[in-house]
Amino acid sequence: MNKIADQLNEREPSLTKEQCFTKVYADPRNRALVAAERAENRPGSEAPLAKGTNVCDRIAALAAALASQHPDMTHDAAVKAVLDRNPALADAYRQECGEAA
């Protein structure tokens, strides 16, 4: 994606590198490339849980990562955001803990 952004920057030098990357990222023609980048660099909790994976630990790790990106976010708000954004993980949490997440 960086290579494509660099090529765009050569064609449109008035754009910053960040603007070029954003255009490349948002371009529907790059949908498969964006999906591959996300899978590689930001694996989501929608990936199947490995046998023996502790759901609570996974939620805590995702919430900590989210809170580190948003320092004003409380731990509880980060956990809620993780569960809201990841229905499969929320279901696994409900099944494991027997609670409404």
Image (spheres, helix red, strand yellow):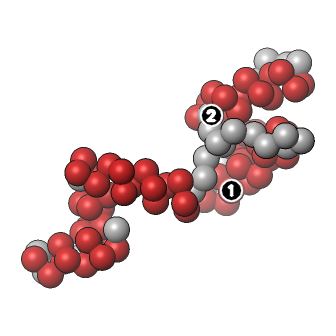
Q: Secondary structure at mark 2?
A: loop
Tag shown at residue 78: none
The x and y percentages for residue 24 are 26, 61
The x and y percentages for residue 85 are 58, 34
Q: Is residue 14 left or right of residue 20?
A: left
Q: Residue furthest front?
A: 51
Q: Is residue 40 above or below residue 8?
A: above
Q: Secondary structure at mark 1?
A: helix
Camera-nearest residue between 99 and 48? 48
Identify residue for label 2: 86
The x and y percentages for residue 57 are 85, 46
Quarter of the figure with residue 11:
bottom left
- In what quadrant of the picture does the C terminus appear? top right
Categorize mark 2 by other alpha carbons within 10 Å: few (<14), some (14-19), many (20+). some
The nearer-to-camera label among 1 and 2 is 2
Q: Residue at x 20, y 77 (%)?
A: 7
User: How much space separates mark 1 and mark 2, taking CA atoms?
Assistant: 14 Å
Count the marks: how many?
2
Q: Residue at x 57, y 56 (%)?
A: 42
Quarter of the figure with residue 64:
bottom right
Identify residue for label 1: 65
Q: Is residue 93 left or right of residue 72?
A: right
- Residue type pointed to by label 2: Asn
Camera-nearest residue between 2 and 101? 2
Q: Is residue 37 left or right of residue 30?
A: right
- Residue type pointed to by label 1: Ala
The x and y percentages for residue 79 are 73, 39
Residue 49 visible: yes
